[in-house]
Each structure stands twice: as structure tokens, then as C-alpha cells.
């Protein structure tokens, strides 16, 4: 029974971590960091030369770049399933081992 509870807890944590990461990513937390790294790359002499040959540095204005929001359909389900698995594993471990 202990191995089942452990596997439930670990699976719930994995789902919750991936769901949380997707939630943070889709809300645009990393957009500012990516924008500033692109701007920094274009500000160096070597970066200007390299940016002529690739399309990584298609940097637009800040209001255009930062307003891009990605949406993932699995985010909510990962958070709900992970939370439920965690609650079930914690409740069962409390009931069985106390």
C-alpha cells in the first residue's frame, strides 16, 4: 500500500509541476526575458552580424513582442489531475498511517 501511495504522490507532483510551468509560461512570464535577450544580442557587434543570417532576431517593438500570449489546452487538466492525486495520496496516507 505504501508503494501505491508513493507513486500517487510522485505522479501528482509531476503533473502539478508541468501544469504550473505551462500556466506560468502561457501567462507571459518569460516574454520580457526573451525580449531583453534579443535586444541585447542585437546591441553587440557580433550579434548584429549574426542577426543578418537568421530570423531569431525579428524583434518588434516592446508592446508587440510582449503581448504574444500562448495558450495550452492541457494546462488546466494537468493542474486539476495533479492536485487531485496529491490530495488523495495525502488523505489516504493520513487515514492509513495515523
Image (spheres, rainbow, N blue to C red):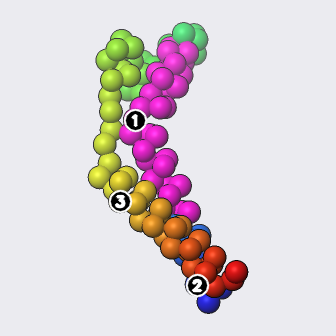
Residue 57 in sight from this viewpoint: yes
Above or below for 25 versus 58: below
Q: Circle 2 is placed at which residue position? A: 4
Residue extending farthest to the right is: 98
- In screen coordinates, is 3 left or right of 84? right
- Residue 63, image quadrant: top left
Residue 90 falls in image quadrant: bottom right
Which residue is label 1 attached to? 27
66 above or below 96? above
Give the residue at x 69% y 83%.
97
Question: Residue at the location (61% across, 81% down)?
Answer: 95
Q: Nearer the viewer, residue 57 or 77?
A: 77
- Residue 54 in sight in this render: no
| Location of residue 94 with respect to 77 vertically, above or below | below
Which residue does the image show at 45% across and 53% down from the upper left? 19
Q: Main secondary structure of the magenta part?
A: helix
Q: Residue 7 placed where, x, y %?
A: 58, 78
Which one is earlier in the sequence, the residue at label 1 or at label 2? Answer: 2
Q: Which of marks 3 and 2 is nearer the N terminus?
A: 2
| Disc number placed over residue 78 in the picture, else none | none
**Residue 77: mark:** 3
* Residue at point 62%, 89% (across, down): 1
Query: Which tag, 1 or 3, sits closer to the chain's start?
Result: 1
Labels 1 & 2 near each other (Cβ < 8 A):
no
Query: Circle 1 — which element?
Result: loop
Disc 1 and disc 3: Cα gap in Å?
16 Å
User: Badge 1 local density, few (<14 within 10 Å), some, or many (20+)?
Assistant: some
Amino acid at each position: 500500500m505504501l508503494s501505491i501511495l508513493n507513486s500517487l504522490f510522485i505522479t501528482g507532483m509531476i503533473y502539478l509541476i508541468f501544469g504550473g510551468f505551462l500556466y506560468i509560461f502561457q501567462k507571459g512570464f518569460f516574454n520580457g526575458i526573451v525580449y531583453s535577450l534579443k535586444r541585447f544580442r542585437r546591441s553587440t557587434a557580433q550579434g548584429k552580424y549574426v542577426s543578418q543570417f537568421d530570423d531569431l532576431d525579428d524583434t518588434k517593438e516592446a508592446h508587440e513582442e510582449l503581448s504574444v500570449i500562448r495558450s495550452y489546452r492541457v494546462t488546466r487538466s494537468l493542474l486539476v489531475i495533479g492536485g487531485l492525486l496529491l490530495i488523495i495520496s495525502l488523505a489516504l496516507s493520513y487515514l492509513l498511517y495515523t
